[in-house]
Amino acid sequence: MSYFYDAHCHVMNLRHPNLSAVINRYLGEAGPWTRIAAGVAVMLTGFPGAQKFLLSLTRKDERILSLLAIMETPLGDYLLQMEEDLQKRVWGKGICIPNSEETYEKVFLTPLLMDFALRGNEKKNSKLVYSVRWKPMADQVRDVCLGIADYYREKESKKEVPMLEVHPFMGINPLIYNLDPNGDDSQTLNQVLDKYFLNFTGAESCSVRRERILAYNWRTFKGDLDALGPDVFLGIKVYPPTGFNPWPMNNKEQTDMIPNAGWKKLRDFYSYCVAKNIPVTTHCSNGGFLTDPAYKDYADPARWAKVLEEYPKLRLNLAHLGHDDRDNEDMTGLFSEKSWRRAAADLACKYDNVYVDISYRGVKPGYYEELGKLFESLTDPVQKRLEDKIIFGSDFMINLMAIDSYSKYMQNFMSSSLGVVLMDKFCNKNPESFLFI
Ligand SMILES: [Zn+2]
C-alpha cells in the first residue's frame, strides 16, 4: 500500500485546548487568535447580542466560523468531512500528483494530540476567579480514539472504502508526570510510556512496525481506555508552548528543574524514546497555543541541539521548519545565522534521525516556490541531504486561521512547481522514514 502522508495535523474539539489560558494571554493583542478567542468566549457565554457579535466577526472572516464548526462537530464527523472535502475538491479520481506516475492509495494521517495541562505560572498571572485546573489527557485520548473508531465504523456501515488511514501521536509532557508511584491514582511517566509504547523496540524493523500498527482494528474501540493497547499510537508529540522545556539553557532553568526531578524525567523520556526508536514531533515555532510568555523560547531549536548532543539517535521532527516570526518571511532567512529555520535545517542535515516538517507554512501563496528556489541555491551535498529530510504536513485545523479548507491546502501543494520527485519525497518517502513504517 502506498500512502500520501500528512504527518502533522490535528483532530481536536473545543474542550481540548486550554482556550481560556490562551485568551487570557492574547487579550489586548491584535491578530487572528484574539478574534477567534473573543468569538469563542462570546459564543460560550451566550450573552444577549452574542449572536450578532459573532456574526459580525464571521462576516469579516468566514474561516473563523469554519474553524469553530469543525471543532464543534463530533470527531468521527470531523474526519468524514476532511475526507469528503478531499474527495470533492482534489482527489475524486484517485490520489495522485498531477502529471506523474505517482499514485497513492490512501491519505495517511497522524493527528498529534497535545498535553494542555498547565504548569502553574499561568495561574499566577491570571486575575480570573475561575481557571481550568486540570486537563486530563485521558479525555483527549478517549475523544480522539473514539472519533477515529467512529470514522471507520461509519465507512463500514456505508460499505465504503476509507480514504484515510489514521494513526495518532500521543501528547506527553514528561515533566508533569510523577517518577514513582505515590499511592494515589496518578500515573508515572514510565507507566504512561509503557501503556502506549510497550510493543515498540529498537530491534523492530520498519516493516514489522508497519504491520503491527496497521493491524490495529479501530472499529473495536468503544471508549474503554484500558482496552487501548500499545499499538494505537505511532509516536509522541511534545508541545513547548504549554510549558514543556526540552532542555534547560541557563542557571535559573537548570535549578528550576531540580525540585521536581525534572532532569531525571527528561533523561528517562529521551532514553526511552531512543531505546524504542519512537518518533517524536516537537512544535518548533514561536507561535501556537502559548499559555505563558515565559514559554516562548522553549520551542527554540537550540534546546534540541543540546538534547541531540546527548541523544544523537533520537528520532525527531522539528515542526514548522523552525518558524520564528521575528525572521524574514521569505526563505532567505534560512541562512541568517541566528534564525530558527537555519538551526532546524542544520540539525536535520547533521543527524540521520532528525527531520523537519513544513506544516502550516504552505498556507502562504508562493511558499513552495520559495522552497524550490532555496533548494536551487544550496550546494549539492546540502541540497541532497535536506531533500530527504523535509516532511509534508498541513497543521489542519489550526491552518484554517489562514486558509479556507483542507482541500485548498492540499491543492496548493499539488499545484506547486516543486516537481514530482521532491513532492513524492515530502509526502511519501521522507515521512515514511521518519515514522519508521
Ligand atoms: Zn500543529
Image (cartoon, rainbow, N blue to C red):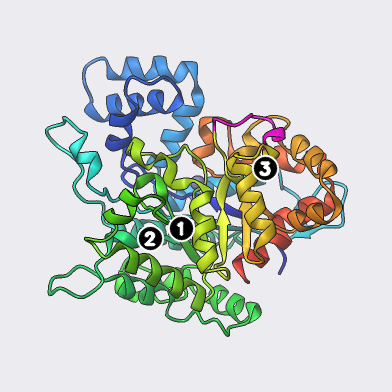
| Circle on res. 237 | 1
Above or below, 31 against 170 in this view is above
Q: Nearer the viewer, mark 3 or mark 1?
A: 1
The residue that mark 2 highlights is 172
Residue at image location 40% in from the left, 69% down from the top: 267
Outermost residue to the front: 251
Could you tell me residue 315's position as x and y percent?
57, 66
Quadrant containing the C terminus in the rendered view: bottom right
Between discs 3 and 1, the one toward the N terminus? 1
Span colored in magenta = 325-333
Q: Position of residue 162 (x, y in %)?
A: 59, 60
Q: Is residue 265 left or right of residue 287?
A: left
Q: Residues within 10 Å of mark 2 (few under 14, many from 20)?
A: many
- Residue 152, position as x, y percentages in the image: 50, 62
Q: Residues within 10 Å of mark 1 (few under 14, many from 20)?
A: many
Residue type at mark 1 is Lys
| Alpha carbons under labels 2 and 1: distance apart | 6 Å
The residue wearing badge 3 is 410
Of pointers 2 and 1, the one earlier in the residue sequence: 2
